Amino acid sequence: MDTEVVRSDIQRSCHVCGSAGQVVYSGLEDRLFKAPGAWDAKRCLNRDCGLIWLDPAPCPADIHKAYANYYTHGDGAASSSFLQAIKEKAKRGYRAGKFAFEADKATAPDRLLGFLIGLLWPGREYLDYGFAQLADLEKGRLLEIGCGNGHLLALMSRWGWACVGLDFDDTAVGNARQKGLKVVLGDLESQRYPEGQFDVIFSSHVIEHVADPKAIVAECLRVLKPGGRCIVVTPNVLAWSHRLFGRHWRGLEPPRHLHLFAPQSLRNLVASCGAEDIRIAASARIASRIFCDSLGSCLDLGARHRPWYAMLGEAMHVVEWGLMITTLASPNEMICVFHRPLLGASASTAASNE
Ligand SMILES: [Zn+2]
């Protein structure tokens, strides 16, 4: 088999609403991880949708070739520098104060540092991530789809959740298991979980990679308990930096990102699968990385330039945070929270009846 060619399938219509699309980018290439091929992306012509998708897209039999050079998750080991120690104290104090997370381990200086970070630092979104979306719930069973090295899963376990993780990457699964976490190699559908198993499902930067987002959302709703909560995190195509960088925007990531959502297309997708109580929040959490990678791709900067534009990325995080809280522009990421209905037809039935 020719490993230099990723075979593809035509994707004529929008996965969310079935409308036709208009080509917005031609000949996109993978400058980051050097997957072969040149790819076209379409935008849905339905103004109440706005989905962007690859057409043609890698066929299921060849999609693995798009991941041949893709980064694997490291073990997430922290450095032991003095600055890192201060950061750890601030994190501990912040989460203890805001979420009662391991409150018995936070000293008074930790809490003071945490309080100051809460006042001043836009990066507190990192510290809220995962906690803020679950803080109002009783602890129960949590499934993370695409858990990587298990960073979030470990935090949630320490917070009192009974956690299970899924990931495709066998190195990441190995690293997560070494931390004592319960992690399975594979995708959601192949687990064949009985209905109503989980109180919460968390999925960060997965839905844009899957060929059939409706199927995975429907399956999430099926395996959630009635009233259970799903959190889906994904790039936002309406982001200001997408407008700035265009075809070089990091969020496009051809050919691994098959579907890219605007808030409305994501809302429409999960609603069509039977979800209720849908909320979509903006997040500037990944601003620095998106900015740096987009700039590097746009100017074709090599790794040797990374230090100076990494500093610029930190500044752009503050800029994006400011744009977000003043609602002047959309940030790069959105966090969609939705629920399985308490009563009525199961989610899978709702999706199949469309
Ligand atoms: Zn559409």
Image (cartoon, helix red, strand yellow):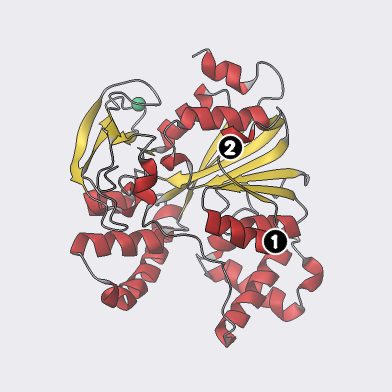
* Location of residue 34 (image quadrant): bottom left
Which one is in front in this view, the residue at disc 2 or the one at disc 1? 2
Tell me if residue 13 comes above or below residue 204 in the rendering.
Answer: above
Looking at the picture, how far across and down is residue 103, in whole percent? 78, 67
Whichever of callouts 2 and 1 sits on the residue coming sooner in the sequence is 1
Residue sitting at 48 percent across and 58 percent down?
Answer: 285
Q: Which mark is residue 221?
A: none
Depth order, front residue of 211/247: 211
Disc 2 to disc 1, how far (Cα)?
32 Å
Residue sitting at 43 percent across and 37 percent down?
Answer: 263
Q: Would you name the residue on which mark 2 appears? A: 188
Residue sitting at 40 percent across and 70 percent down?
Answer: 314
| Visible residue check, residue 51 | yes
Tell me if residue 336 comes above or below residue 91 in the rendering.
Answer: above
Looking at the picture, how far across and down is residue 196, in whole percent? 72, 29
Looking at the picture, how far across and down is residue 315, in whole percent? 37, 70
Looking at the picture, how far across and down is residue 225, in whole percent? 72, 31
Q: Would you name the residue on which mark 1 appears? A: 98
Identity, as a three-letter code, of the amino acid under mark 1 = Lys
* Location of residue 230 (image quadrant): top right
Tell me if residue 354 comes above or below residue 317 in the rendering.
Answer: above
Identity, as a three-letter code, of the amino acid under mark 2 = Leu
Image side of residue 277 versus residue 2, left or right: right
